[in-house]
């Protein structure tokens, strides 16, 4: 059924655009204005695409943008749906699978995350080197869809080290404050308790958020090269001096959006 739905979705998108994207990008909370830097060919709202679901969270517009950046054809998901919104894991990763069916080779995931390292500051970025799935679910659970990938996909390098190194070179050259580390994916929608934050640091986490892990798993299953970047919008509970709010997340992301767009444009140009 999923395979049939994907074929219908891709046929609908291709009826609106003949562009063959090489790279896919999923834009997280507050980072959606990157689309203003794209030479847009086609824009399609999620609620018009068969089997897509529109996001309900502020900061996630819910549009598929097809176009090019620095002569690289790209497909951008402006906003994502989350597991905590009540969707199945299959629904959460459905847009990722759709991009793969459109022909992308590289997927870049972005998100807003809480920092687990006291040395981090709101507005820093973190290149994700690895993740810990604490969501209590997996998008590959159930019968394997052999057309998409193997039953037991390898995750020894879930995030492509060459892409990460290239991204770090650009961040260093532009003197952008950044870190590298492990992202802990939790289900949400509550922010973590101070005790949970202490646990996450004990197991090696450096940032925590409520997205990205499902898409990374699905993308590896599909054989895509994956890289991911967190915008550290706040320090996690127990490290921050004030209570956490989604307003803080979106405001911090928007404050560094120009910087984000600048280095992302250079990164795309290297592909």
Image: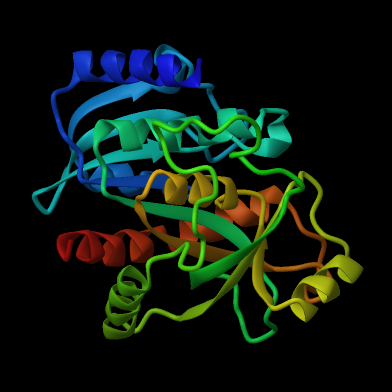
Q: Residue furthest left?
A: 71
Q: Position of residue 188 (x, y in %)?
A: 76, 47
Instruction: Name the quadrant containing residue 43.
Output: top left
Q: Position of residue 107 (x, y in %)?
A: 35, 50
Q: Name the one closer to the observer, 227 or 16.
A: 227
Relative to residue 185, is residue 204 depicted above or below?
A: below
Q: Quadrant of the C terminus?
A: bottom left
- Identify which residue is drawn at 61% across, 80% down: 120
Q: Name the one closer to the observer, 172 or 217.
A: 217
Q: Is residue 248 left or right of residue 13?
A: right
Instruction: Name the quadrant containing residue 117.
Output: bottom right
- Identify which residue is drawn at 33% across, 40% down: 76
Q: Position of residue 181 (x, y in %)?
A: 56, 76
The image shows a total of numbered marks equal to 0
- Identify which residue is drawn at 46% across, 67% down: 157
Q: Is residue 70 left or right of residue 144?
A: left
- Identify which residue is drawn at 35% across, 78% down: 168
Relative to residue 5, is residue 140 depicted above or below?
A: below
Instruction: Name the quadrant containing residue 182.
Output: bottom right
Display coloring: rainbow
Q: Position of residue 51 (x, y in %)?
A: 48, 16
Q: Is residue 29 visible?
A: no
Q: Is residue 196 visible?
A: yes
């Amino acid at each position: 059924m999923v395979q049939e739905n994907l074929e219908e979705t891709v046929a609908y998108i291709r009826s609106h655009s003949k562009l063959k994207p090489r790279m896919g990008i999923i834009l997280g909370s507050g980072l959606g204005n990157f689309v203003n830097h794209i030479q847009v060919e086609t824009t399609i709202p999620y609620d018009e695409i068969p089997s897509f679901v529109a996001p309900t969270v502020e900061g996630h517009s819910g549009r598929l943008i097809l176009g090019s950046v620095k002569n690289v054809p790209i497909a951008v998901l402006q906003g994502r749906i989350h597991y905590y919104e009540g969707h199945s894991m299959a629904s959460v990763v459905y847009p990722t699978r759709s991009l793969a069916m459109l022909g992308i080779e590289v997927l870049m995931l972005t998100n807003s995350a809480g920092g687990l390292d006291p040395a981090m500051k709101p507005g820093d970025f973190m290149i994700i080197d690895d993740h810990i799935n604490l969501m209590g679910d997996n998008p590959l659970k159930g019968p394997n869809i052999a057309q998409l990938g193997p039953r037991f996909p390898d995750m020894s390098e879930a995030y492509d080290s060459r892409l990460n190194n290239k991204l770090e070179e650009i961040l260093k050259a532009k003197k952008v404050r950044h870190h590298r580390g492990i992202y802990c994916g939790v289900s949400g929608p509550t922010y973590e308790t101070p005790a949970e934050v202490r646990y996450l640091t004990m197991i090696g986490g450096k940032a925590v958020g409520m997205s990205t892990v499902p898409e990374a798993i699905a993308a590896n299953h599909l054989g895509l090269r994956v890289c991911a970047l967190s915008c550290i919008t706040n320090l996690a509970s127990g490290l921050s001096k004030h209570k956490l709010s989604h307003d803080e997340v979106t405001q911090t992301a928007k404050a560094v959006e120009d910087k984000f767009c600048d280095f992302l444009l250079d990164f795309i140009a290297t592909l």
